[in-house]
Image (tube, rainbow, N blue to C red):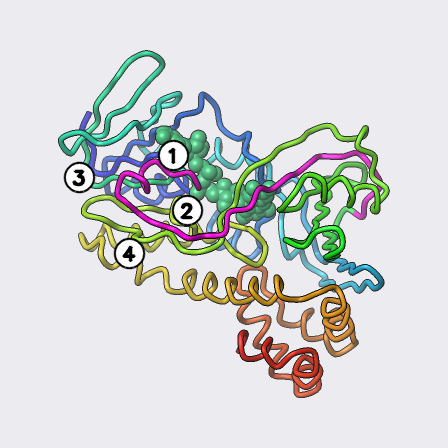
């Protein structure tokens, strides 16, 4: 087995990259699972990114045109006429991308796991059998616990959190996501409610299962109405290097994840485009530079995360007052960008009244975000 590019990991990012490379390279994907999907992931992707990335319509389960934000004592709503984010079926997304890659000539090795490198070749295990595959370039798209990252000595001091998510039967507004911020229930992260329909939603948080239980009671969702439960990890921070010799990391393997919301699908795919450009140039070294948009967003997200962690509920309530004011909502409705949080915050800080009010909460916030 000899390829130009061997992609380890057939998650959304690996399969997406396979499609991008199929026309110009001999490509294979190695996936350790026997089928796609199954990962804990709410599957919310910004509508603009979804369209721009050319992702399959077939995988969309629901479309959101707004969000309702709840603190312990306040709530406010932002909305637009058109859908701002989609909720996707992860299995359908991965399978659609894989099928399309196969049609373009990519070879798939399912139920096959990468074990390590020996003499420049990838050692793989398919059921009880050992195989070797050789490639000019190897790509680790093998998720947060990336074996490839470990093999090339990529290091991280990222904050790793466990995410818990359920699908639960209840009453929901189908085209609105709910975001709940209550430090008394969860110090680590917000809670989300992402409806699939008016009767079913994905509800989750990062941190502890106990926090999710408390939230479900507050939101009056019965644990006995849960029809699916999943847990998984996210990592906020840097894992470097993204390239070593003829090996590159992409997606969660490189921690290309938003520290603001834990969304990683769109950022991984955006970086897949940079990786393709670097491969076409025959210069893997240019890959990381090409991901400058994602790197800036991660860097902003990490600063945002530090602020979030440092705030108590009183601070959260004051920020809710500011963002939930008429002017705050107007700015969010006009400028919020699902995948460009830096742009959203800049729009808020450009409004003198909002800026002054945030300065009164803490000048540190402005210093960190500006
Ligand atoms: C609770 C939770 C909710 C989330 N919600 C969202 C959301 O709403 N929107 C969003 O954008 N992101 C979300 N994320 C993050 C999102 O799941 C990841 O960013 C995304 O899955 C990254 O895709 P990937 O292809 O890089 O990695 P993965 O999806 O992890 O795929 C990696 C693939 O590699 C395979 N693999 C691993 N090791 C090997 C090996 N040794 N050999 C062969 N194959 C291997 C795995 O089986 C897997 O299929 C969420 C995460 C969690 C935990």
Return the residue at label 1: 9
The earlier-in-sequence mark between 3 and 4 is: 3
User: Going by the image, does 6 lie left or right of 214?
Assistant: left
Tell me the mark number nearer the camera, choosing from 3 and 2.
2
Callout 1: 10 Å neighbours few (<14), some, many (20+)?
A: many
Q: Can you identify the residue that label 3 sits on?
A: 136
* First-in-chain label (3 vs 2): 3
The residue lying toward the viewer, choosing from 360 and 227, is 360
Q: Is residue 59 above or below residue 132?
A: below
Question: Measured along the vertical axis of the image, is residue 70 above or below residue 194?
Answer: below
Sequence-wise, the earlier of marks 4 and 2 is: 2
In this rendering, does residue 56 appear at all?
Answer: no
Say whether disc 3 or disc 1 marks the residue closer to the N-terminus: 1
Cβ–Cβ under 8 Å for marks 1 and 4? no
Whether residue 154 is in magenta: the answer is: yes
Query: Does the image show residue 316?
Result: yes
In-image side of 40 versus 265 (left or right):
right
Residue 251's disc is 2
As measured in the structure, the alpha-carbon distance from the residue carrying label 1 to the one carrying label 2 is 10 Å
Q: Position of residue 335 (x, y in %)?
A: 62, 71
- Cα separation between marks 1 and 4: 19 Å
Q: According to the image, label 4 marks what residue?
A: 287
Q: Residue at (51%, 47%) from the top-left corner?
A: 160
Q: Nearer the viewer, residue 350 or 262?
A: 262
């Amino acid at each position: 087995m000899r390829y130009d590019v061997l992609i380890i990991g057939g998650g959304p990012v690996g399969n997406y990259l396979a499609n991008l490379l199929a026309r110009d390279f001999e490509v294979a994907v190695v996936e350790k699972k026997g089928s796609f999907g199954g990962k804990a992931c709410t599957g919310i992707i910004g509508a603009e990114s979804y369209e721009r990335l050319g992702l399959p319509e077939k995988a969309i389960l629901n479309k959101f045109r707004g969000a309702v934000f709840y603190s312990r004592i306040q709530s406010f709503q932002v909305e637009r006429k058109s859908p701002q984010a989609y909720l996707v079926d992860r299995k359908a997304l991965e399978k659609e991308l894989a099928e399309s890659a196969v049609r373009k000539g990519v070879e798939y090795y399912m139920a096959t796991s990468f074990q390590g490198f020996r003499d420049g070749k990838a050692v793989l295990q398919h059921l009880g059998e050992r195989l070797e595959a050789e490639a000019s370039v190897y790509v680790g798209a093998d998720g947060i616990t990336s074996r490839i990252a470990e093999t090339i000595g990529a290091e991280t001091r990222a904050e790793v959190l466990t995410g818990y998510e359920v699908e639960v039967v209840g009453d929901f507004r189908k085209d609105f996501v709910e975001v709940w911020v209550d430090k008394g229930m969860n110090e680590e992260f917000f809670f989300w409610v992402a409806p699939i329909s008016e009767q079913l939603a994905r509800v989750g948080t990062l941190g502890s299962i106990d926090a999710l239980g408390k939230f479900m009671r507050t939101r009056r969702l019965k644990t006995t109405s849960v029809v699916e439960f999943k847990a998984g990890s996210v990592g906020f921070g840097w894992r470097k290097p993204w390239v070593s010799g003829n090996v590159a990391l992409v997606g969660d393997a490189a921690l290309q994840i938003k520290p603001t919301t834990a969304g990683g699908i769109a950022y991984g795919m955006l970086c897949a485009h940079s990786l393709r450009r670097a491969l076409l140039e025959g210069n893997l070294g240019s890959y990381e530079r090409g991901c400058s948009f994602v790197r800036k967003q991660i860097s902003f997200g990490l600063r945002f995360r530090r602020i979030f962690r440092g705030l108590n509920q009183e601070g959260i309530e004051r920020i809710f007052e500011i963002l939930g004011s008429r002017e705050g909502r107007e700015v969010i409705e006009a400028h919020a960008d699902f995948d460009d949080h830096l742009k959203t915050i800049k729009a808020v800080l450009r409004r003198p009244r909002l800026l002054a009010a945030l300065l009164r909460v803490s000048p540190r916030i402005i210093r960190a975000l500006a």
